[in-house]
Amino acid sequence: MGVEEELLPVETALHQNSPNPVVDETGIPYTLSERTRTNLRIYDITGKLVRTLIDEVQSTGGKEVLWDRRNQNGESVPSGIYFYKLDIGNRTLTKTMVVL
């Protein structure tokens, strides 16, 4: 007899970026519990949009996006505190990172 694997439900989550503080680039990991429209954006301390990293329908599972410290215009952002926000369906998850 084989052993059946119990499939655990996948929970939507936004994880801490790594490395943090950010020097050159950082990975932003997240998990989706269902196929959904996904938006991942970076904001500065004033709430101004810095860059949209993801804006598409994505499938269930673990994901990671790399951010190269650049804004929408391709310019390197200054040191400071930044927020990254994951919008999925009717949920919004936010984390903070430091850029050196």
Image: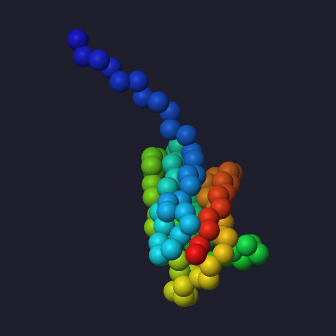
Query: Looking at the image, what colour scheme do you see?
Result: rainbow
Residue in the picture at 47% in, 30% down: 8
Look at the image and tell me whether residue 71 can be seen: yes
Front position in the image: 22 or 92: 22
Residue in the picture at 45% in, 58% down: 64
Residue in the picture at 33% in, 20% down: 4
x and y percentages locating residue 6 in the rendered image: 41, 24
x and y percentages locating residue 48 in the rendered image: 72, 77
Front position in the image: 10 or 90: 10
x and y percentages locating residue 67 in the rendered image: 49, 71
Residue lying farthest left? 1
Side of 51 relative to 9 (left or right) = right
Residue 62 vertical placement versus 94 (above, below)? above
**Quadrant of the snapshot with the N terminus:** top left
Residue lying farthest top? 1
Residue 68 vertical placement versus 9 (above, below)? below
Look at the image and tell me whether residue 55 can be seen: no
x and y percentages locating residue 51 in the rendered image: 59, 76
Q: Quadrant of residue 78?
A: bottom right
**Quadrant of the snapshot with the C terminus:** bottom right
Disc tally is: 0
